[in-house]
Image (tube, rainbow, N blue to C red):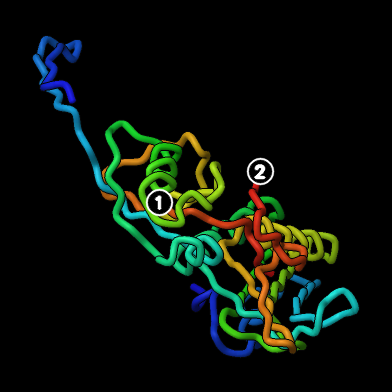
Amino acid sequence: MAGPRHGHDGRGTVTFQSPVRATVRVRFFARYAELLGRAEADVEVPMPATVHDVVRRVRDAFPGGAALPERPLAAVNLTHVRFDAPVRAGDEVALLPPMAGG
Amino acid sequence: MSASRLTRSAITLDPLLAEVAGDERGGTCVFVGTVRNGPDEAGVVAIEYSAYPEMAEAELERILAEAHAAHPGARAAACHRLGDIPVGDASVAVVAAAPHRDAAFAACRFVIEEIKRRLPVWKKERRVDGTTAWLDSSGRPVPADEVPR
């Protein structure tokens, strides 16, 4: 990865920005938990990242991950989100099979 | 404030009815969904319901708040059961009360439809022959190679 970058924040202050990787907690439910053989995992992704990046990492890095859909339904911190929603360090990202309540 | 919206015990309607009751609300609508073993099912014994419980609680509160916003004067309450539920037992109940029946029916319908669309709950059918199958929201078995959207 590239080293630290620096720039201006528009107010005359020099800011330094290092390439950052962040860890999010990913939870799997129902059929997806069966496919992966686990209910949760800590996943590290380069920032900035989206749900899409997290899913791609899970599909690539975990046994059984490739069996997940490429674009599963997802939630971040208990709220349904779009697939391109941003994720931040410490977020809980849930991959949700199609809802079947009722 | 309501108790938990999720339960692992048999659903009882009285607490839900009490939650929505009010002198100004003259119509109350109740919907109860039960585990089914009809001609389209293959010998269902029970359905095992699982959930993302923290989110299901939060999402159900959001759905109820939306029902109240969409139907001023109406109050709605709901409860979803989780775990192994035998055929004939209730898996979900929704009650809605409003000054008049139109709003009570509409609020009740809104809540159950949004539960089916948005609540992170899943069901796995257990059959007489010992086999199991994940079900979609309509109660049909999910093909093993299903890819949503």
Residue A83 shown left or right of residue B145 in the figure: left
Residue B9 seen in the figure = yes
Residue at x 72%, y 84% (from the top left corner): B127
Amino acid type for the residue under numbered disc 1? Val
Residue B99 in picture, x, y percent from top left: 77, 65
Residue B21 seen in the figure = no
Residue at x 18%, y 15% (from the top left corner): A9
Label 2 SS: loop
Query: How packed is label 2: few (under 14 Cα within 10 Å), some, or many (20 or more)?
Result: few
Label 1 SS: strand
How many marks do you count on the picture? Answer: 2
Residue A3 shown left or right of residue B101 in the figure: left
Numbered tag placed on residue B149 in the rendering? 2
Amino acid type for the residue under numbered disc 2? Arg
Nearer to me, B5 or A27: A27
> Which chain does tag 2 point to?
B
Q: Alpha-carbon distance for marks 1 and 2?
A: 19 Å
Q: Which quadrant is the C terminus of chain B positioned in? A: top right
Q: Is residue A74 above or below residue B42?
A: above
Residue B7 in picture, x, y percent from top left: 54, 82
Residue A19 in picture, x, y percent from top left: 18, 28
Residue at x 73%, y 66% (from the top left corner): B141
Farthest right residue in view:
B39
Residue linked to disc 1? A93
